[in-house]
Image (cartoon, helix red, strand yellow):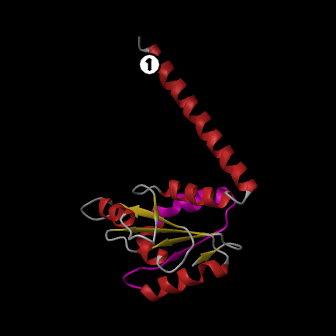
Amino acid sequence: MTVTEKPRVGLMVGSPGDLPRVREALTLLRSLGIPCEVVVASAHRTPEKVRRYATSAAGRGLEVIIAAAGLAAHLPGAVAAQTTLPVIGLPLAAGTLGGLDALLAMVQMPPGIPVATVGIDAARNAALLAAAILAVRDEALAAKLQAYRKKMAAEQEAKAAQQLEALRGEE
């Protein structure tokens, strides 16, 4: 497990091979100043580790858990069943269905055990959703998120202007 000071977000993956696929979430969380930890735990191969992690998370100060998995994608649901913390499911493209199986598994949780789910391989959106959840009670983080969105909008506008100018030049 990789730990920074007093983690607020837990980032879980079902296998070591998934770690590179969640790097963007980890990078974004850190850039927003959100301490986080990363753990590899499989709902199928190491279910006791998943249980221990989920049941101890709130007591250790975690406020949100992002659980990334592909294929059957049971990790987010297994975690959500063991904690009342918000759990964000991050479906990963894997196998012959390219992540659709993981996405459907996550959004079809039984009543009473919700998992908030982002798009397939949408690590950045998982991090942003975790940040938004934390920002409800953290004004400084809310300001950072607002600045992030303003920067994103400005970049979009600049890119659009550049492309429109290139189109005009082709006339």
User: How many numbered marks appear?
Assistant: 1
Report the front residue among 60 and 3: 60
Q: Which residues are magenta?
A: 20-46
Give the residue pinned by disc 1: 167
For badge 1, the amino acid type reads Leu
Would you place residue 157 above or below residue 34 in this image?
A: above
- Which residue is at the far front? 111
Q: Is residue 58 above or below residue 105?
A: below
On-image quarter of the C terminus: top left
Residue 15 can be seen in this image: no
Is 162 placed left or right of 16 in the picture? right
Measuring from the top left, give residue 33's x and y in whole percent: 70, 60
Residue 3 quadrant: bottom right
Examine the image and state in which quarter residue 140 appears: bottom right
- At horizontal 64% and vertical 46% (from top left) the residue drawn is 148
Taking 94 as reference, is 171 left or right?
right
Res. 121 image quadrant: bottom left
Image position, residue 28 (x, y; %): 60, 56
Q: Secondary structure at mark 1?
A: helix
Give the image location of residue 22, x and y in percent. 49, 63
**Residue occupying the far bottom of the picture:** 48
Q: Residue at x 45, y 55 (%)?
A: 122
Tell me which residue sits at (32%, 71%) in the image. Answer: 72
Q: Residue at x 52, y 62 (%)?
A: 23
The image shows residue 105 at horizontal and vertical percentages of 34, 66
Q: Residues within 10 Å of mark 1 (few under 14, many from 20)?
A: few
